[in-house]
Image (cartoon, helix red, strand yellow):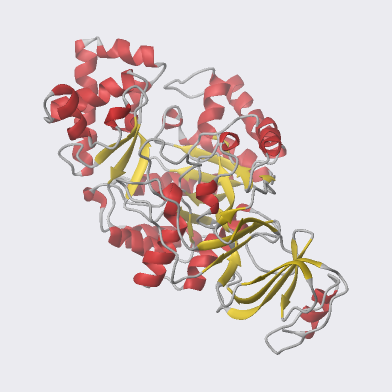
Amino acid sequence: MTIMAWLRSVTFGCMISCSLGWAQETTIPFDVIIRQARIVDGSGQASWLGDIGIHGGKITALGEVKGKAKQELNVQGKVVAPGFIDVHTHSEKICELPVAENFLRMGVTTIVTGNCGMSRTDVSAFFREIDQAKVSLHVATLIGHGAVREQGMGGKFIRAPDAAQLEAMKKLVDQAMRDGALGMSTGLIYVPGSFAKTEEIVTLAKVVAAHDGIYSSHMRYETSRIFTALDELTCIAREAKVKTELSHIKLSGPSAWGRAPEVLAYLDKARAEGLRITHDQYAYTASSTGLRQTIPDEALEGTRADFAARLKEPIRKAEIIQGMKEILSRSGRRDYSYAVIARFADDPSLNGLTIPQAAKKLRGSDALEDQIELLLEIEKRGGGSGVFHGMNEEDLKVFLKHPLTMIASDGGPRLLGEDVPHPRSYGNNARVLARYVREQKVLSLEEAIQRMTSLPAETFGLKNRGALKIGYWADLVIFDPDQVQDTSQFDDPHHYAQGFNDVLVDGMPVIRDGNLTGEHPGGALRR
Protein backbone atom coordinates (compact mmCIF):
# COMPACT_ATOMS: atom_id res chain seq x y z
CA MET A 1 0.00 0.00 0.00
CA THR A 2 1.33 3.42 -0.89
CA ILE A 3 1.58 6.27 1.63
CA MET A 4 -1.05 8.27 -0.32
CA ALA A 5 -3.42 5.32 -0.37
CA TRP A 6 -2.94 4.87 3.37
CA LEU A 7 -3.63 8.53 4.02
CA ARG A 8 -6.82 8.39 1.97
CA SER A 9 -8.05 5.43 3.98
CA VAL A 10 -7.55 7.30 7.24
CA THR A 11 -10.07 9.92 6.17
CA PHE A 12 -12.84 7.40 6.65
CA GLY A 13 -12.27 7.61 10.41
CA CYS A 14 -10.92 4.13 10.86
CA MET A 15 -7.49 2.57 10.77
CA ILE A 16 -6.71 -0.34 8.52
CA SER A 17 -4.04 -2.90 8.10
CA CYS A 18 -2.43 -3.83 4.83
CA SER A 19 -0.52 -6.96 4.01
CA LEU A 20 2.56 -5.44 5.71
CA GLY A 21 0.82 -5.82 9.06
CA TRP A 22 -0.22 -2.28 10.12
CA ALA A 23 -3.04 -2.27 12.66
CA GLN A 24 -4.65 0.30 14.91
CA GLU A 25 -7.74 0.68 17.09
CA THR A 26 -10.68 2.51 15.55
CA THR A 27 -12.74 5.12 17.36
CA ILE A 28 -15.86 4.30 15.33
CA PRO A 29 -17.86 1.27 16.52
CA PHE A 30 -18.37 -1.46 13.95
CA ASP A 31 -21.75 -2.95 13.20
CA VAL A 32 -20.11 -6.12 11.84
CA ILE A 33 -16.58 -7.48 11.78
CA ILE A 34 -15.78 -10.45 9.59
CA ARG A 35 -12.62 -12.16 10.80
CA GLN A 36 -10.12 -14.59 9.25
CA ALA A 37 -11.52 -14.16 5.75
CA ARG A 38 -9.98 -15.20 2.48
CA ILE A 39 -10.68 -11.92 0.77
CA VAL A 40 -11.39 -12.01 -2.96
CA ASP A 41 -11.94 -8.32 -3.51
CA GLY A 42 -13.44 -8.33 -7.01
CA SER A 43 -10.43 -6.81 -8.75
CA GLY A 44 -9.23 -10.09 -10.22
CA GLN A 45 -6.08 -9.95 -8.10
CA ALA A 46 -4.97 -12.81 -5.87
CA SER A 47 -6.89 -13.40 -2.67
CA TRP A 48 -5.42 -12.50 0.72
CA LEU A 49 -6.22 -13.16 4.38
CA GLY A 50 -7.68 -10.43 6.53
CA ASP A 51 -10.64 -8.94 8.37
CA ILE A 52 -13.45 -6.66 7.22
CA GLY A 53 -15.09 -3.98 9.34
CA ILE A 54 -18.54 -2.65 8.46
CA HIS A 55 -20.34 0.43 9.77
CA GLY A 56 -23.41 2.21 8.46
CA GLY A 57 -23.83 -0.29 5.65
CA LYS A 58 -20.36 0.38 4.23
CA ILE A 59 -16.92 -1.17 4.45
CA THR A 60 -14.90 0.97 6.84
CA ALA A 61 -11.90 -1.25 7.56
CA LEU A 62 -9.88 -3.89 5.74
CA GLY A 63 -6.89 -5.83 6.97
CA GLU A 64 -6.21 -6.64 10.63
CA VAL A 65 -9.24 -4.97 12.19
CA LYS A 66 -9.06 -4.33 15.94
CA GLY A 67 -11.93 -3.29 18.12
CA LYS A 68 -15.36 -4.74 18.73
CA ALA A 69 -18.60 -4.92 16.83
CA LYS A 70 -22.24 -5.58 17.52
CA GLN A 71 -21.86 -8.75 15.49
CA GLU A 72 -18.70 -10.72 14.69
CA LEU A 73 -18.40 -13.47 12.11
CA ASN A 74 -15.33 -15.70 12.25
CA VAL A 75 -15.37 -17.34 8.85
CA GLN A 76 -12.15 -19.34 9.37
CA GLY A 77 -10.68 -18.96 5.91
CA LYS A 78 -13.85 -19.06 3.86
CA VAL A 79 -14.00 -16.77 0.84
CA VAL A 80 -15.50 -13.34 1.36
CA ALA A 81 -16.31 -11.60 -1.91
CA PRO A 82 -18.47 -8.71 -3.06
CA GLY A 83 -22.10 -9.70 -3.50
CA PHE A 84 -22.69 -10.87 -7.04
CA ILE A 85 -24.31 -8.48 -9.53
CA ASP A 86 -26.59 -10.16 -12.07
CA VAL A 87 -26.96 -7.71 -14.96
CA HIS A 88 -29.38 -9.81 -17.00
CA THR A 89 -32.56 -10.85 -15.22
CA HIS A 90 -36.26 -10.77 -15.91
CA SER A 91 -37.56 -9.61 -12.56
CA GLU A 92 -40.41 -7.25 -13.39
CA LYS A 93 -42.52 -9.20 -10.87
CA ILE A 94 -39.96 -8.89 -8.06
CA CYS A 95 -42.56 -7.31 -5.77
CA GLU A 96 -44.51 -10.57 -5.79
CA LEU A 97 -41.45 -12.45 -4.46
CA PRO A 98 -39.52 -9.68 -2.63
CA VAL A 99 -37.19 -12.08 -0.80
CA ALA A 100 -35.88 -13.41 -4.14
CA GLU A 101 -34.41 -16.32 -2.21
CA ASN A 102 -33.18 -18.14 -5.31
CA PHE A 103 -30.90 -15.17 -6.08
CA LEU A 104 -29.67 -14.70 -2.51
CA ARG A 105 -28.79 -18.37 -2.17
CA MET A 106 -26.40 -18.19 -5.11
CA GLY A 107 -24.74 -15.05 -3.75
CA VAL A 108 -26.55 -12.42 -5.81
CA THR A 109 -27.19 -9.14 -3.99
CA THR A 110 -27.99 -6.87 -6.97
CA ILE A 111 -30.09 -7.60 -10.04
CA VAL A 112 -30.73 -5.66 -13.23
CA THR A 113 -34.12 -6.24 -14.83
CA GLY A 114 -35.81 -4.80 -17.93
CA ASN A 115 -33.77 -6.92 -20.33
CA CYS A 116 -34.55 -8.17 -23.85
CA GLY A 117 -36.78 -5.18 -24.58
CA MET A 118 -39.26 -6.07 -21.84
CA SER A 119 -39.78 -3.71 -18.90
CA ARG A 120 -42.14 -1.44 -17.08
CA THR A 121 -42.28 1.87 -18.94
CA ASP A 122 -43.00 3.98 -15.84
CA VAL A 123 -39.68 3.48 -14.09
CA SER A 124 -40.48 5.93 -11.29
CA ALA A 125 -43.63 3.99 -10.35
CA PHE A 126 -41.75 0.68 -10.59
CA PHE A 127 -39.07 1.92 -8.20
CA ARG A 128 -41.69 3.15 -5.73
CA GLU A 129 -43.32 -0.27 -5.72
CA ILE A 130 -39.95 -1.94 -5.15
CA ASP A 131 -39.20 0.27 -2.15
CA GLN A 132 -42.67 -0.30 -0.72
CA ALA A 133 -42.33 -4.07 -1.15
CA LYS A 134 -39.19 -4.08 1.04
CA VAL A 135 -37.15 -6.39 -1.15
CA SER A 136 -34.11 -8.23 0.17
CA LEU A 137 -31.66 -7.21 -2.54
CA HIS A 138 -30.97 -4.23 -4.80
CA VAL A 139 -32.98 -3.88 -8.01
CA ALA A 140 -31.95 -1.74 -10.98
CA THR A 141 -33.68 -1.63 -14.34
CA LEU A 142 -33.27 -0.91 -18.02
CA ILE A 143 -36.05 0.58 -20.11
CA GLY A 144 -37.25 -1.99 -22.64
CA HIS A 145 -37.44 -0.90 -26.27
CA GLY A 146 -40.20 -3.42 -27.00
CA ALA A 147 -42.37 -2.00 -24.22
CA VAL A 148 -41.64 1.53 -25.40
CA ARG A 149 -42.48 0.61 -28.99
CA GLU A 150 -45.76 -0.98 -28.02
CA GLN A 151 -46.82 2.00 -25.91
CA GLY A 152 -45.52 4.64 -28.29
CA MET A 153 -47.13 3.09 -31.35
CA GLY A 154 -50.33 2.02 -29.67
CA GLY A 155 -49.80 -1.63 -30.57
CA LYS A 156 -47.56 -3.98 -32.51
CA PHE A 157 -47.01 -3.05 -36.14
CA ILE A 158 -44.84 -4.35 -38.97
CA ARG A 159 -43.68 -0.87 -39.92
CA ALA A 160 -41.56 2.01 -38.73
CA PRO A 161 -43.09 4.56 -36.33
CA ASP A 162 -44.23 7.86 -37.81
CA ALA A 163 -42.57 11.10 -36.64
CA ALA A 164 -45.04 11.67 -33.80
CA GLN A 165 -44.76 8.09 -32.57
CA LEU A 166 -40.97 8.18 -32.65
CA GLU A 167 -41.00 11.41 -30.67
CA ALA A 168 -43.30 9.80 -28.10
CA MET A 169 -40.90 6.86 -27.84
CA LYS A 170 -37.93 9.19 -27.35
CA LYS A 171 -39.78 10.95 -24.53
CA LEU A 172 -40.52 7.64 -22.82
CA VAL A 173 -36.85 6.64 -22.96
CA ASP A 174 -35.69 10.08 -21.80
CA GLN A 175 -38.08 10.06 -18.84
CA ALA A 176 -37.02 6.54 -17.86
CA MET A 177 -33.39 7.62 -17.86
CA ARG A 178 -34.24 10.68 -15.75
CA ASP A 179 -36.09 8.39 -13.33
CA GLY A 180 -32.98 6.25 -12.86
CA ALA A 181 -32.95 3.55 -15.55
CA LEU A 182 -29.44 2.30 -16.35
CA GLY A 183 -30.04 2.28 -20.08
CA MET A 184 -32.21 0.70 -22.77
CA SER A 185 -32.55 -2.93 -23.81
CA THR A 186 -33.75 -4.48 -27.03
CA GLY A 187 -35.14 -7.91 -27.78
CA LEU A 188 -34.80 -8.05 -31.54
CA ILE A 189 -36.11 -11.59 -31.83
CA TYR A 190 -39.32 -10.66 -30.02
CA VAL A 191 -42.44 -8.94 -31.33
CA PRO A 192 -42.67 -5.91 -31.51
CA GLY A 193 -38.90 -5.27 -31.34
CA SER A 194 -38.31 -7.63 -34.25
CA PHE A 195 -40.21 -5.22 -36.50
CA ALA A 196 -37.91 -2.28 -35.67
CA LYS A 197 -35.36 -1.08 -38.17
CA THR A 198 -31.81 -0.22 -37.14
CA GLU A 199 -32.41 3.52 -37.63
CA GLU A 200 -35.18 3.50 -35.02
CA ILE A 201 -32.93 1.85 -32.45
CA VAL A 202 -30.06 4.26 -33.18
CA THR A 203 -32.38 7.22 -32.58
CA LEU A 204 -33.46 5.90 -29.18
CA ALA A 205 -29.95 4.79 -28.24
CA LYS A 206 -28.78 8.37 -28.76
CA VAL A 207 -31.19 9.41 -26.00
CA VAL A 208 -29.60 6.81 -23.74
CA ALA A 209 -26.10 7.99 -24.66
CA ALA A 210 -27.02 11.57 -23.72
CA HIS A 211 -27.57 10.29 -20.18
CA ASP A 212 -24.36 8.20 -20.25
CA GLY A 213 -26.44 5.03 -20.11
CA ILE A 214 -25.89 1.62 -21.66
CA TYR A 215 -27.53 -0.08 -24.64
CA SER A 216 -28.08 -3.80 -23.94
CA SER A 217 -29.22 -6.03 -26.79
CA HIS A 218 -30.66 -9.45 -27.29
CA MET A 219 -29.53 -9.41 -30.89
CA ARG A 220 -31.61 -10.24 -33.94
CA TYR A 221 -29.80 -13.52 -34.55
CA GLU A 222 -27.79 -15.90 -32.36
CA THR A 223 -27.67 -18.60 -35.01
CA SER A 224 -25.53 -19.08 -38.11
CA ARG A 225 -26.67 -15.55 -39.06
CA ILE A 226 -24.97 -14.06 -35.99
CA PHE A 227 -22.54 -11.92 -37.97
CA THR A 228 -25.43 -10.05 -39.56
CA ALA A 229 -26.66 -9.32 -36.04
CA LEU A 230 -23.18 -8.24 -34.95
CA ASP A 231 -23.06 -5.82 -37.87
CA GLU A 232 -26.24 -4.22 -36.56
CA LEU A 233 -25.01 -4.18 -32.96
CA THR A 234 -21.78 -2.42 -33.86
CA CYS A 235 -23.60 -0.01 -36.18
CA ILE A 236 -25.83 1.07 -33.29
CA ALA A 237 -22.86 1.38 -30.94
CA ARG A 238 -20.97 3.47 -33.48
CA GLU A 239 -23.81 5.70 -34.69
CA ALA A 240 -25.29 6.38 -31.26
CA LYS A 241 -21.87 6.59 -29.56
CA VAL A 242 -23.30 4.47 -26.77
CA LYS A 243 -21.77 1.93 -24.41
CA THR A 244 -23.10 -1.44 -25.55
CA GLU A 245 -23.78 -4.80 -23.94
CA LEU A 246 -24.30 -8.02 -25.92
CA SER A 247 -26.85 -10.00 -23.92
CA HIS A 248 -26.24 -13.71 -23.19
CA ILE A 249 -23.59 -14.28 -25.84
CA LYS A 250 -24.15 -17.65 -27.48
CA LEU A 251 -24.26 -19.68 -30.69
CA SER A 252 -27.60 -21.43 -31.02
CA GLY A 253 -28.18 -24.45 -33.22
CA PRO A 254 -25.76 -27.03 -34.65
CA SER A 255 -25.27 -25.00 -37.84
CA ALA A 256 -23.64 -22.22 -35.75
CA TRP A 257 -21.47 -24.31 -33.43
CA GLY A 258 -17.72 -23.88 -33.40
CA ARG A 259 -17.62 -20.22 -34.40
CA ALA A 260 -17.06 -18.71 -30.95
CA PRO A 261 -13.45 -17.65 -31.73
CA GLU A 262 -14.69 -15.82 -34.84
CA VAL A 263 -17.38 -14.02 -32.86
CA LEU A 264 -14.88 -12.86 -30.25
CA ALA A 265 -12.38 -11.81 -32.93
CA TYR A 266 -15.14 -9.71 -34.54
CA LEU A 267 -15.91 -8.03 -31.20
CA ASP A 268 -12.26 -7.49 -30.31
CA LYS A 269 -11.75 -5.77 -33.67
CA ALA A 270 -14.72 -3.50 -32.97
CA ARG A 271 -13.28 -2.64 -29.56
CA ALA A 272 -9.90 -1.88 -31.11
CA GLU A 273 -11.72 0.59 -33.34
CA GLY A 274 -13.02 2.42 -30.26
CA LEU A 275 -16.41 0.82 -29.61
CA ARG A 276 -17.30 0.11 -25.98
CA ILE A 277 -18.77 -3.38 -26.08
CA THR A 278 -19.03 -6.02 -23.35
CA HIS A 279 -21.07 -9.21 -23.06
CA ASP A 280 -22.74 -11.43 -20.48
CA GLN A 281 -23.33 -15.18 -20.39
CA TYR A 282 -25.13 -17.87 -18.42
CA ALA A 283 -23.37 -21.15 -17.74
CA TYR A 284 -25.71 -23.59 -19.50
CA THR A 285 -26.05 -25.02 -23.00
CA ALA A 286 -29.81 -24.47 -23.03
CA SER A 287 -31.74 -21.22 -23.36
CA SER A 288 -35.25 -20.38 -22.24
CA THR A 289 -37.87 -18.17 -23.84
CA GLY A 290 -41.41 -18.22 -25.19
CA LEU A 291 -42.45 -21.18 -27.33
CA ARG A 292 -43.78 -18.62 -29.82
CA GLN A 293 -40.20 -18.07 -30.96
CA THR A 294 -40.66 -21.19 -33.09
CA ILE A 295 -43.29 -19.27 -35.12
CA PRO A 296 -42.45 -16.61 -37.73
CA ASP A 297 -42.78 -13.05 -36.40
CA GLU A 298 -45.21 -11.96 -39.10
CA ALA A 299 -47.73 -14.50 -37.84
CA LEU A 300 -47.60 -13.02 -34.34
CA GLU A 301 -48.29 -9.37 -35.18
CA GLY A 302 -51.30 -8.05 -33.27
CA THR A 303 -53.39 -10.01 -30.75
CA ARG A 304 -53.86 -13.73 -30.20
CA ALA A 305 -57.27 -13.34 -31.77
CA ASP A 306 -55.49 -12.07 -34.89
CA PHE A 307 -53.21 -15.10 -34.73
CA ALA A 308 -56.14 -17.50 -34.38
CA ALA A 309 -57.85 -15.85 -37.35
CA ARG A 310 -54.76 -16.39 -39.51
CA LEU A 311 -54.78 -20.09 -38.66
CA LYS A 312 -58.32 -20.35 -40.04
CA GLU A 313 -57.10 -19.23 -43.47
CA PRO A 314 -55.66 -22.36 -45.17
CA ILE A 315 -53.20 -20.49 -47.37
CA ARG A 316 -51.98 -18.29 -44.49
CA LYS A 317 -51.65 -21.26 -42.16
CA ALA A 318 -49.65 -23.17 -44.76
CA GLU A 319 -47.29 -20.20 -45.03
CA ILE A 320 -46.84 -20.13 -41.24
CA ILE A 321 -46.08 -23.86 -41.15
CA GLN A 322 -43.58 -23.52 -43.98
CA GLY A 323 -41.91 -20.65 -42.10
CA MET A 324 -41.59 -22.83 -38.99
CA LYS A 325 -39.95 -25.57 -41.03
CA GLU A 326 -37.51 -23.07 -42.53
CA ILE A 327 -36.53 -21.84 -39.05
CA LEU A 328 -35.86 -25.44 -38.04
CA SER A 329 -33.83 -26.13 -41.17
CA ARG A 330 -31.62 -23.03 -40.76
CA SER A 331 -30.72 -24.17 -37.25
CA GLY A 332 -29.68 -27.61 -38.49
CA ARG A 333 -32.55 -29.50 -36.81
CA ARG A 334 -35.19 -31.89 -38.06
CA ASP A 335 -37.77 -31.58 -35.27
CA TYR A 336 -38.44 -29.98 -31.87
CA SER A 337 -36.95 -32.68 -29.64
CA TYR A 338 -34.51 -30.02 -28.35
CA ALA A 339 -37.40 -28.02 -26.83
CA VAL A 340 -39.01 -28.75 -23.44
CA ILE A 341 -42.21 -27.11 -22.21
CA ALA A 342 -41.40 -25.15 -19.06
CA ARG A 343 -44.80 -23.57 -18.52
CA PHE A 344 -48.15 -23.91 -20.25
CA ALA A 345 -50.80 -22.48 -17.95
CA ASP A 346 -53.71 -23.91 -19.93
CA ASP A 347 -52.47 -27.49 -19.46
CA PRO A 348 -49.75 -27.85 -16.79
CA SER A 349 -49.65 -31.62 -17.39
CA LEU A 350 -47.43 -30.85 -20.38
CA ASN A 351 -44.81 -29.04 -18.29
CA GLY A 352 -41.50 -30.88 -18.42
CA LEU A 353 -42.27 -32.76 -21.64
CA THR A 354 -40.39 -32.30 -24.89
CA ILE A 355 -42.49 -31.08 -27.81
CA PRO A 356 -42.54 -34.57 -29.41
CA GLN A 357 -43.60 -36.11 -26.07
CA ALA A 358 -46.36 -33.53 -25.63
CA ALA A 359 -47.55 -34.02 -29.22
CA LYS A 360 -47.70 -37.76 -28.66
CA LYS A 361 -49.71 -37.24 -25.48
CA LEU A 362 -52.24 -34.80 -26.93
CA ARG A 363 -52.40 -35.80 -30.59
CA GLY A 364 -51.39 -39.46 -30.53
CA SER A 365 -48.40 -38.82 -32.82
CA ASP A 366 -44.98 -37.23 -32.50
CA ALA A 367 -44.55 -36.61 -36.24
CA LEU A 368 -43.19 -33.19 -37.16
CA GLU A 369 -46.59 -32.07 -38.45
CA ASP A 370 -48.16 -32.90 -35.08
CA GLN A 371 -45.37 -31.11 -33.23
CA ILE A 372 -46.05 -27.99 -35.30
CA GLU A 373 -49.79 -28.25 -34.71
CA LEU A 374 -49.12 -28.51 -30.97
CA LEU A 375 -46.97 -25.35 -30.97
CA LEU A 376 -49.65 -23.46 -32.89
CA GLU A 377 -52.29 -24.69 -30.46
CA ILE A 378 -50.22 -23.64 -27.42
CA GLU A 379 -49.83 -20.13 -28.82
CA LYS A 380 -53.54 -19.93 -29.64
CA ARG A 381 -54.41 -20.99 -26.06
CA GLY A 382 -52.37 -18.30 -24.33
CA GLY A 383 -48.79 -19.24 -25.11
CA GLY A 384 -46.14 -20.93 -23.04
CA SER A 385 -42.45 -20.91 -22.29
CA GLY A 386 -39.81 -23.49 -23.02
CA VAL A 387 -36.26 -24.62 -22.40
CA PHE A 388 -34.28 -25.03 -25.61
CA HIS A 389 -31.21 -27.28 -25.66
CA GLY A 390 -29.29 -25.68 -28.48
CA MET A 391 -25.69 -24.77 -27.59
CA ASN A 392 -22.30 -26.42 -27.51
CA GLU A 393 -20.27 -26.45 -24.29
CA GLU A 394 -16.96 -25.86 -26.07
CA ASP A 395 -18.36 -22.58 -27.45
CA LEU A 396 -19.62 -21.74 -23.98
CA LYS A 397 -16.14 -22.15 -22.52
CA VAL A 398 -14.52 -20.05 -25.24
CA PHE A 399 -16.91 -17.19 -24.49
CA LEU A 400 -16.47 -17.66 -20.75
CA LYS A 401 -12.70 -17.25 -20.93
CA HIS A 402 -12.92 -13.80 -22.52
CA PRO A 403 -12.08 -11.08 -19.96
CA LEU A 404 -15.10 -8.95 -20.91
CA THR A 405 -17.69 -11.69 -20.37
CA MET A 406 -19.83 -11.14 -17.29
CA ILE A 407 -21.79 -13.87 -15.51
CA ALA A 408 -25.55 -13.28 -15.67
CA SER A 409 -28.43 -15.71 -15.22
CA ASP A 410 -31.15 -14.51 -17.63
CA GLY A 411 -33.43 -15.76 -14.85
CA GLY A 412 -35.93 -14.30 -12.43
CA PRO A 413 -37.37 -14.74 -8.94
CA ARG A 414 -38.65 -18.28 -8.53
CA LEU A 415 -41.28 -19.90 -6.32
CA LEU A 416 -40.26 -23.41 -5.29
CA GLY A 417 -42.30 -26.03 -7.11
CA GLU A 418 -43.92 -23.75 -9.69
CA ASP A 419 -43.62 -24.99 -13.31
CA VAL A 420 -40.43 -26.61 -14.73
CA PRO A 421 -38.19 -23.58 -15.32
CA HIS A 422 -34.60 -23.37 -16.52
CA PRO A 423 -32.22 -24.16 -13.61
CA ARG A 424 -30.20 -20.97 -14.23
CA SER A 425 -32.47 -18.99 -11.90
CA TYR A 426 -31.32 -21.22 -9.04
CA GLY A 427 -27.77 -22.17 -9.86
CA ASN A 428 -26.02 -19.96 -12.41
CA ASN A 429 -23.33 -18.42 -10.20
CA ALA A 430 -22.84 -21.62 -8.25
CA ARG A 431 -22.44 -23.58 -11.49
CA VAL A 432 -19.66 -21.27 -12.66
CA LEU A 433 -17.82 -21.63 -9.35
CA ALA A 434 -18.33 -25.40 -9.14
CA ARG A 435 -18.03 -26.62 -12.74
CA TYR A 436 -15.90 -24.02 -14.49
CA VAL A 437 -13.65 -22.92 -11.61
CA ARG A 438 -13.26 -25.86 -9.23
CA GLU A 439 -13.73 -28.82 -11.58
CA GLN A 440 -12.65 -27.75 -15.06
CA LYS A 441 -10.45 -24.76 -14.13
CA VAL A 442 -11.64 -22.71 -17.10
CA LEU A 443 -11.34 -19.63 -14.85
CA SER A 444 -9.53 -18.95 -11.62
CA LEU A 445 -11.64 -18.12 -8.59
CA GLU A 446 -10.48 -14.52 -8.70
CA GLU A 447 -11.33 -14.19 -12.41
CA ALA A 448 -14.82 -15.61 -11.90
CA ILE A 449 -15.54 -13.32 -8.97
CA GLN A 450 -14.37 -10.29 -10.96
CA ARG A 451 -16.83 -11.22 -13.76
CA MET A 452 -19.65 -11.36 -11.18
CA THR A 453 -18.80 -8.16 -9.31
CA SER A 454 -16.55 -5.29 -10.37
CA LEU A 455 -16.90 -5.81 -14.13
CA PRO A 456 -20.72 -5.58 -14.07
CA ALA A 457 -20.62 -2.70 -11.58
CA GLU A 458 -18.23 -0.69 -13.75
CA THR A 459 -20.01 -1.56 -16.99
CA PHE A 460 -23.48 -0.63 -15.77
CA GLY A 461 -22.40 2.37 -13.71
CA LEU A 462 -23.23 1.01 -10.23
CA LYS A 463 -21.09 3.26 -8.08
CA ASN A 464 -19.38 2.06 -4.91
CA ARG A 465 -20.46 -1.54 -5.48
CA GLY A 466 -18.84 -4.65 -6.86
CA ALA A 467 -15.57 -4.47 -4.90
CA LEU A 468 -14.27 -4.80 -1.37
CA LYS A 469 -12.90 -1.31 -0.82
CA ILE A 470 -13.05 1.24 1.94
CA GLY A 471 -16.19 3.34 1.48
CA TYR A 472 -17.96 0.81 -0.75
CA TRP A 473 -21.34 -0.61 0.20
CA ALA A 474 -21.03 -3.81 2.17
CA ASP A 475 -22.78 -6.23 -0.16
CA LEU A 476 -20.91 -9.43 0.69
CA VAL A 477 -21.11 -13.16 0.12
CA ILE A 478 -19.30 -15.75 2.23
CA PHE A 479 -18.76 -19.26 0.92
CA ASP A 480 -16.51 -22.31 0.91
CA PRO A 481 -15.30 -22.76 -2.70
CA ASP A 482 -14.93 -26.49 -2.11
CA GLN A 483 -18.59 -26.83 -1.11
CA VAL A 484 -20.39 -24.51 -3.54
CA GLN A 485 -22.67 -26.52 -5.81
CA ASP A 486 -25.56 -25.98 -8.21
CA THR A 487 -28.16 -28.61 -7.35
CA SER A 488 -30.90 -27.49 -9.74
CA GLN A 489 -31.28 -29.78 -12.75
CA PHE A 490 -33.27 -29.41 -15.98
CA ASP A 491 -35.70 -32.18 -15.04
CA ASP A 492 -35.74 -31.23 -11.33
CA PRO A 493 -35.01 -27.50 -11.13
CA HIS A 494 -36.46 -26.43 -7.80
CA HIS A 495 -33.38 -26.64 -5.58
CA TYR A 496 -31.39 -23.76 -4.12
CA ALA A 497 -27.66 -23.55 -4.65
CA GLN A 498 -25.50 -24.85 -1.80
CA GLY A 499 -22.47 -23.43 -0.06
CA PHE A 500 -23.40 -19.75 0.40
CA ASN A 501 -23.65 -19.72 4.17
CA ASP A 502 -23.76 -15.96 4.71
CA VAL A 503 -24.96 -13.09 2.54
CA LEU A 504 -25.00 -9.42 3.54
CA VAL A 505 -26.80 -6.57 1.78
CA ASP A 506 -25.67 -3.07 2.77
CA GLY A 507 -23.94 -4.60 5.77
CA MET A 508 -27.03 -6.41 7.03
CA PRO A 509 -27.08 -10.22 7.05
CA VAL A 510 -29.95 -11.57 4.94
CA ILE A 511 -28.63 -15.14 5.18
CA ARG A 512 -26.78 -16.17 8.34
CA ASP A 513 -25.41 -19.68 8.89
CA GLY A 514 -27.50 -20.85 5.95
CA ASN A 515 -30.79 -19.42 7.21
CA LEU A 516 -32.81 -16.42 6.10
CA THR A 517 -32.70 -13.69 8.74
CA GLY A 518 -35.96 -11.99 7.76
CA GLU A 519 -34.20 -8.70 7.02
CA HIS A 520 -35.06 -6.77 3.85
CA PRO A 521 -32.39 -4.08 3.39
CA GLY A 522 -32.59 -3.91 -0.41
CA GLY A 523 -34.55 -1.59 -2.66
CA ALA A 524 -34.54 0.30 -5.91
CA LEU A 525 -31.10 1.12 -7.27
CA ARG A 526 -31.25 4.21 -9.45
CA ARG A 527 -28.66 5.25 -12.00
Residue at 86% over, 71% down: 13
For the residue pair 114 and 99, the one nearer the viewer reads as 99
Instruction: Determine the image quadrant of residue 506.
Output: bottom right
Q: Is residue 195 left or right of residue 333?
A: right
Does the image show residue 31?
A: yes
Residue at 72% over, 81% down: 64
Find residue 111 and report its horizontal and vertical position in percent. Answer: 57, 48
Residue at 69% over, 41% down: 180
For the residue pair 99 and 313, the one nearer the viewer reads as 99
Find residue 448 and report its horizontal and vertical position in percent. Answer: 48, 67
Does the image show residue 87?
A: no
Residue at 36% over, 13% down: 306
With respect to residue 428, does 210 lie above or below? above
How many callouts does the rendering have? Answer: 0
Find residue 347 and report its horizontal and vertical position in percent. Answer: 31, 24
Q: Is residue 26 left or right of residue 507?
A: right
Q: Is residue 223 left or right of residue 413?
A: left
Find residue 18 and report its horizontal and vertical position in percent. Answer: 71, 83
Quick one: quadrant of the N terminus? bottom right
Residue furthest toward the right?
27
